[in-house]
Image (cartoon, rainbow, N blue to C red):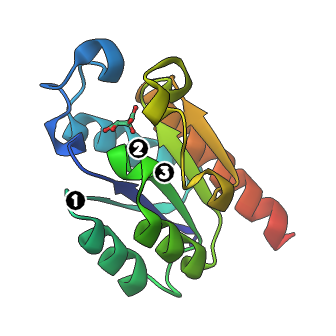
Amino acid sequence: MTAILVLHGPNLNALGRRDRHHYGTLTLDEINRRIAERAEHLGVSVDCFQSNHEGALIDRLQESAGRIDGVVVNAGALTHYGLSLKDALTDAGVPVVEVHLSNIHAREEWRRRSVLADTALGQIAGLGWRGYTAALEALVGIIADEAG
Ligand code: DQA
């Protein structure tokens, strides 16, 4: 069965309490439930992991080596400077889709640059929690296409 790792970076554990204008009202548990429901519908397995620590995200990626077919990642602010996470995503050797709840391109200048973007197949930003399920669906479709 196709296996997808969903990584959530720093501060995403506080969703629901954070700036609702940018990040919506759902908690991370509620978002993970919607991701799991979509995964079930698509017939794939999904593992959702959040950490406030870059090293823990890297550890999870390395532990998953050889057991995952793709990654959906919202790295939070690590998006903008997390070069160790970027290297780990590259080393994972599987397709990656980058997600942001908010439209990072319509916010402060420093949020507009993603150091992960050229590691990813593509990026979904500004669609709220739906970005995760859209990313999952696209990633699973692309993996199936590649498997031929
Ligand atoms: C975010 C955007 C980042 O700039 C920010 O640091 C976050 C969340 C988003 O989902 O919109 O923590 O990745």
Observer able to see residue 74: no
Reading the image, the residue beneath label 1 is: 51
Going by the image, does 79 lie left or right of 141? left
The spot of residue 33 in percent (x, y) is 30, 42
Ligand 1 shown in quarter: top left
Residue visible at 67% across and 56% down? 118
Name the kind of residue labelled 3 in the image.
Ala
Residue visible at 62% across and 41% down? 123
Name the kind of residue labelled 1 in the image.
Ser
Question: Any mark on residue 39, and which?
Answer: 3
Please determine whether, in this image, residue 110 is positioned above or below residue 121.
Answer: above
The spot of residue 127 in percent (x, y) is 51, 23
Q: Earlier in the sequence, mark 3 or mark 1?
A: 3
Which quadrant would residue 125 be assigned to in this image? top right
Q: Nearer the viewer, mark 3 or mark 1?
A: 1
Observer able to see residue 76: yes
Residue visible at 62% across and 44% down? 137
Pointers 2 and 3 in contact (CB under 8 A)?
A: yes
Near mark 2 (Cα within 10 A), the count class, few <14, some 14-19 or many ≥20, is many
Reading the image, the residue beneath label 2 is: 35
